[in-house]
Image: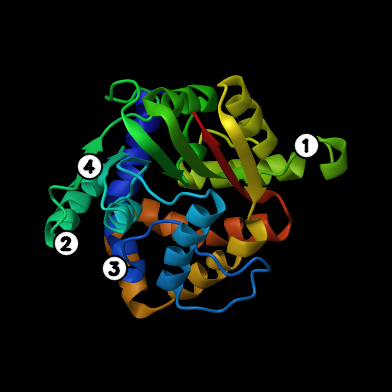
Amino acid sequence: MSATLYERIGQFYDSSSSLWEQVWGEHMHHGYYGTDGKQRKERRQAQIDLIEELLQWADVEQAQHILDVGCGIGGSSLYLAQKFDAQATGITLSSFQANRATQRAQAMGLSQKAEFLVANAQNMPFADNSFDFVWALESGEHMPDKVKFMQECYRVLQPGGKLVMVTWCHRPTDAKSGGILTADEQKHLNEIYQVYHLPYTIALPEYEAIARNLNLNSIRTADWSTAVAPFWDVVIDSALNPTAILGLILSGWETIQAALSLGLMQRGYQRGLIRFGLLCGIK
């Protein structure tokens, strides 16, 4: 990952995270709207439901030492630390996010249970076999070397520990799924990459192949695109309220550009190009 991309990602979340928390709260990820995507619920509840549905899907019933790769402002880290009475460590490229997550841990009385660091997920500052549960919720899309990213997650995972990874993907490119991406599809993806500072995405079967090469055991994958797609409709609606509009103006051009481009993700799901991919496995 180049220093320039690191800086762009960090700056993007430095400038946008405060507004997101103000409008949406502590969870910086999709919500879950039922397997058919038709359940209607309060937006923050949908985000909590996503965490719970993921834990159930991956059969995670306990954890002692959790790593949250791409922790945002600590939403998942602190939720999991409380749920499992566990130690949680979160890493992010944003100094604002790490500081805000630390503040939130203090406010919740979890300072002894959680710590947050600015760190590179492709070169983590942790010893081998440090965590029994590695959680990466919507961070893989930012990684310029998907193999190195998953190698690092595997390295820091204890034998017998579990990796749960959820990431933005593009549609599979096998013959059944429509073959290679069209020029129009690639253009659509490139526009998303530019707005959200993503180097590229890959299809879920490619992540599975990487996991198999790592010798992860009990590998499972799933596509939850239908269940989470309504999230972008709700985000677009929320961006239109006066508080959000004022916050956008104060947050600067990058955040405004991201808000103006929300329809890119909405349309990406509608046309089947953007996929919400899940993978879990045991070391």
Task: Give above or below for 200 relative to 23.
Answer: above
Location of mark 3 (residue): 22
The amino acid pointed to by label 4 is Phe
Q: Which mark sits nearer the N-terminus, 1 or 4?
A: 4
Determine the CA span between mark 3 and mark 1: 39 Å
Query: Which disc is residue 108 wearing?
Result: 2
Q: Which residue is painted at 59% across and 56% down in the image? A: 265
From the viewer's perspective, is residue 74 above or below residue 52? above
Mark pair 4, 3: CA separation: 20 Å
Per the image, label 3 sits on a secondary structure element best described as: helix
Residue depth check, mark 1 versus mark 4: number of the one nearer the observer: 4
Amino acid carrying mark 1 in the image: Thr
- Distance in Å between CA atoms under marks 4 and 2: 14 Å
Residues at badges 4 and 2 in contact (C-beta under 8 Å)?
no
| Front in this rendered view, residue 129 or 144 | 129
> In the rendered image, which residue does mark 1 sit on?
173
Q: Which mark is residue 116?
A: 4
Residue 154 screen position, x and y as percent: 45, 26
Residue 63 appears in the figure:
yes
